Amino acid sequence: MNNGIVYLVGAGPGDPSLITVRGVECLRRAEVVVYDYLANEQLLCHAPGTAERIYAGKVGGRHNQGQDEINNLLVAKAGAGKIVVRLKGGDPFVFGRGGEECEALRDAGIPFEVVPGVTAAIGASAYSGIPLTHRDITASVAFVTGQEGKDKFESNIDWDRLSLGGGTVVFYMGITTLRRNMQRLIEHGRAAETPVALVRWATTACQQVLVGTLADIADRAEESGFKPPAITIVGEVVSLREKLQWYDTRPLCGKKILVTRAAEQAGEFSAKLAARGASVLECPTIRLVEPESWQLLDLAIRELPEYDWLILTSANAVRYFFQRLDMLGLDARAVAGCRVCVVGPKTADEMRSYGVKADLIPTDYKAEGVVKEFSRLDMQGSRVLFPRADKARDIIPQELKRLGAHVDSPVAYRNIFPDRLPPETLFALEKRSVDCITFTSSSTVQNLAAMLGEELMHDMLKGVAVASIGPITSKTCRDLGLKVDIEPQSYTMDALVAALETYFA
Ligand code: SAH
């Protein structure tokens, strides 16, 4: 049976969290994703890694692929039995040519489903604080193409009706034709002082809003070099923005912040910055790799039944340990005879994902806390396996040995620094568009210096504010020739976020 189907999915206006739940469900099942210029590429992360990704972008009329080609592609892929997601910016049926694609699919007998999206006008309205209707101001709104006369929508616009009556008018694709369209509204009777807002890259960290009137917005746009893609909102409702704007008044709005991260611990910090309006670039400065040799770990794994305790102090250690078990043809049953100690709730969760519940989870996450728990037990003569990172501190094996245990601590993975920065980070630094870089441990600074070389690091960070989590990290910064601009009183992530807010206020 042929399961081929096309889901026309609205990607929403830009902010990747504005896609619908149904849209994400479709992406998760996709075997082929055909996506547009205006659909945020970050959404592709919802599709399986194996899904074929095809860019069918159109940039300001320069069509990378003609509409017929796209239609044929959808028919061919779904006809071959594939689950195809056609991901389109905003909503598929609002100036999205979704109608034409559905017609082609219907003609070819291919089943399809349409998943609506938040269209750009609605996204721009919400994120600029301009309600499109308001009980006291207007009860109607029209979505209009700004390209009237240029393509198929030719002269379907009734300028008289649009101009009279005071309803809100929202133009799509209306920046290059802004002057002409504003003039038309005035000529057909709308007051020249009617407020107008242009909202560019609405709902994204680069959102720009320009406010003026029908009479002067085109001049203002020209003066400030305002470019597409943008939505034009015309009507008295625009004046509500002064009171209702919220998105661009957040404390870190418009700031590009580079978060140098030790593997896997930056997510929460980045999310806090993003919630305050920052545009966050994550820059991993630590990479995990296999040990130079598996010999010692393999030996220990073969002797697992002889061990009394297995200690794993990080989610990474759990992952590498179980991956190695798997490689050796074993599974969780191999640790059935040992008691298991893990450090921290994340490690415990990871352990549980392999079907093993920990017997001991020390309340204090530091190595000292682990030792304290074991000092309450009789460890004399017991055998302990402690697979760990190459650069881990020696406290646990040393102290357990003092308690009389035999401890083996083979290396299960190594921490190294990646050989290069992610391309988007490098690009942002070269363009001098980064406002601030954050360091949350000495190794993040040291590794960045090692990756770039000290000289290049100084050069790239010219004009970039340096934020450090505390005195030790700050000292490392200074030792490497960096001036620290931001350091919180207490060294927690929350305090660092607050210090950033104060700095940029
Ligand atoms: N189907 C899309 C519209 C595609 S037409 C939707 O429903 O939103 C392309 C036009 O949409 C652009 O010229 C611009 O006017 C508008 N647009 C799309 N995304 C936008 C964004 N993030 N910010 C401002 N305008 C946007």
Image: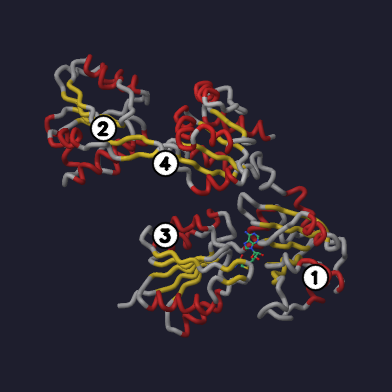
Reply above or below: 301 against 46: above
Q: Does the rendering let one see residue 86?
A: yes
State the separation of the CA atoms marked 1 and 2. Answer: 69 Å
Position of the N terminus by quadrant: bottom left
Residue type, mark 1 in image: Arg
Q: Is residue 344 left or right of residue 501?
A: left
Say whether disc 4 or disc 2 marks the residue closer to the N-terminus.
Answer: 2
Reply above or below: 106 against 199: below
For label 1, the residue is 180
Report if the CB atoms under discs 4 and 1 are less than 8 Å apart: no
State the separation of the CA atoms marked 1 and 3. Answer: 42 Å
For label 4, the residue is 419
Residue type, mark 4 in image: Asp
Q: Return the mark for residue 411.
A: 2
Position of the C terminus by quadrant: top right
For label 3, the residue is 47
- Residue 461 at what x, y percent from top left? 59, 36
Say whether disc 1 or disc 3 marks the residue closer to the N-terminus.
Answer: 3
* Neighbour tally class for label 1: few under 14, some 14-19, many 20 plus, Cα within 10 Å: few
Ligand 1, what quadrant?
A: bottom right
- Image point 32% across, 40% down: which residue? 289
Asked which secondary structure carries label 4, the reply is: loop
